[in-house]
Amino acid sequence: MEIKGIDVSSYQGEIDWKTVNEYGMGFAILRISEKSNARDSQFENNYAGCIQYGIPVGVYKYSYALTVAEIQQEAEKVVDVLDGRPLDFPVFLDLEWSKQRALSESALTTLIKTFWSVITTAGYKFGIYCNMDWYDNVIPDALKDKYDFWIARYPANDDGWLQERLRPSVGVGWQYSSKAKIPGINGNVDRDVFYKDYADKEDEPMGLWEKTKQLLDAQVGYLEKRSNSNLDSKTGNAGYNNYTKYSRDVNNMGLMGCQGQPWCAVYQFWICAQIFGKQKALEIMGNGFYNCNSVKARSKSKGTWHSTPKLGSLVIFRNGAHIGRVIAINGNTIRTNEGNTSAGGLNTVEANGGCVAEKSYTIGNSQIDGYVWIDYGEDFSDGTDCWKATGTATATVDNLYVRAYPNGEIIGELMKGNRFEINGVTSGKWTQVNVAGIGVGWIWTEYIQKDGVQTAEPPKQEIADKQDKTQRLFVGKVTASALNVRTWAGTEFPQIKSYPTLNRGNLVDVMNYTQTANDGSKWYYIRIAGKYHGFVSAEYIERQ
């Protein structure tokens, strides 16, 4: 299995993640902090873009530490910046600084283990990035089987393409170029291939609400600052001048300046942006992330304003003076997570208290204006799973993605013939489903068939009476440098998740199931490694 992706930093400037996603991207590994231990200036934009377009994400930290205290600071900075936000790929410790090379084996081992301890204690996966020379001559042998390694190796005449002769025989990932060209990115970008799919979780994927709740919990206790310093510390430089990391990050997203201003709405926008991406967050917050009344007015015009609470909904107080988020519903009481408030007893609304805290209110409290419902791709209204099946349906194609919300994050994958529950809820061309082992999500309606009802399958032209997709016609060899494997014949269909891209020279089984795409091109149905199936353009396959 090979998954192709990129690693990026502020050197790439502002990235058009929509274009990158449309090009096809298996993952992105983002630089999280710079030499001074300051946050990479493009990290927030890059993270939000990956989340918005469902690109699996990891981070890396180029280390300049020579002592335990210094590397602990680096690791703690990584954890502070992530602030509980989810990652698919690991946090990679980037080891390539010449001064670290001079350390003894024992000293380097201690640095690595210190960084590993901080990162894994915070709940993140850990790996090491280094070049082939470092792996062979610097990394202690005792650590090579202990950690996952991402190896850099490319030629002096690097032209952006994978050169098979340099493929390392070690590691779970290979950085094969530093001069690749990708639509949506100006200039050169590092290109990588991984053989381990960190995003392919064996257990049930965490839903969007679970991720949101985890992120909200991690913010409790944050104190606003008296000045524009120590913004990432929960308690340092505390004061009442409305300086926060949330406002800084929102400013870094290219939105209007809001530092030093009341921040209850900015905080809720920040939460939405980490989970849904900037554009979806703006839609939820009505393009008025700095103003509670704008949020209220927008939600009324869009039909998301309600007089009753729902788990995860925004709650507006006192004629638009304050905003929070519902994190629990117990009988006649809601519990909220709020920014720019103070800890207080039941029904205590504090619109300028200076911290992130959890609060409780009776549902009929007169200070509550109403609620802005947010679609997390799950059907709940009272804190419990309210799924009510109206029937079952079956997938009509292989490698059918289940998404957390319409056109959102991929949370699972189905094969043709897999059965699941439906509840009759649709959104445009999407149908809400409940899949065993995956949970509640959304599937493109065209690719499902309600049990007992005949519906159209994806458009295709078959060679009548001659095809048998279980029969191999011949062994084919890939002639393109990178060949996308798609769920159906045609470039308009998504890549399969299991094996999205093939490389020049790869061998595949070409099956007896040739299709014609809508543009008239010929496509082969292929089998990869004896078990993965998909469609590729016949133009780039030659018979062995």
Image (tube, rainbow, N blue to C red):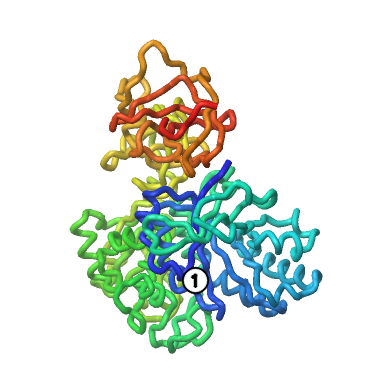
| Left-right relation of 129 to 375 | right
> From the image, which quarter does the N terminus lie in?
top right
Q: Position of residue 334 (x, y in %)?
A: 40, 61
Tell which residue pokes out farthest to the left in this image.
Answer: 301
Residue that lies at the very extreme toward the top in this rendered image:
465
Residue at figure coordinates x 80%, y 69% from the top left? 105
Q: Residue shown at 57%/47% (left/top)?
A: 197
Camera-side residue of 172 and 217: 172
Residue 484 screen position, x and y as percent: 44, 40
Q: Which residue is mark 1?
A: 220
Would you place residue 509 above or below residue 108 in this image?
above
Q: How many marks?
A: 1
* Left or right for 310, reference 30: left
In the displayed structure image, the side of residue 464 where residue 498 appears, left or right: right
Q: Quadrant of the C terminus?
A: top right
Q: Is 346 placed above or below 334 here? A: below
Q: Residue at x 33, y 55 (%)?
A: 374
Of residue 349 and residue 183, the one placed in the foreground of this image is 183
Residue type of the residue flagged with mark 1: Val
Q: How far from the left and from the top, in percent, is residue 64?
A: 64, 76
Q: Is residue 423 visible?
A: yes
Is residue 71 shown above or below 431?
below
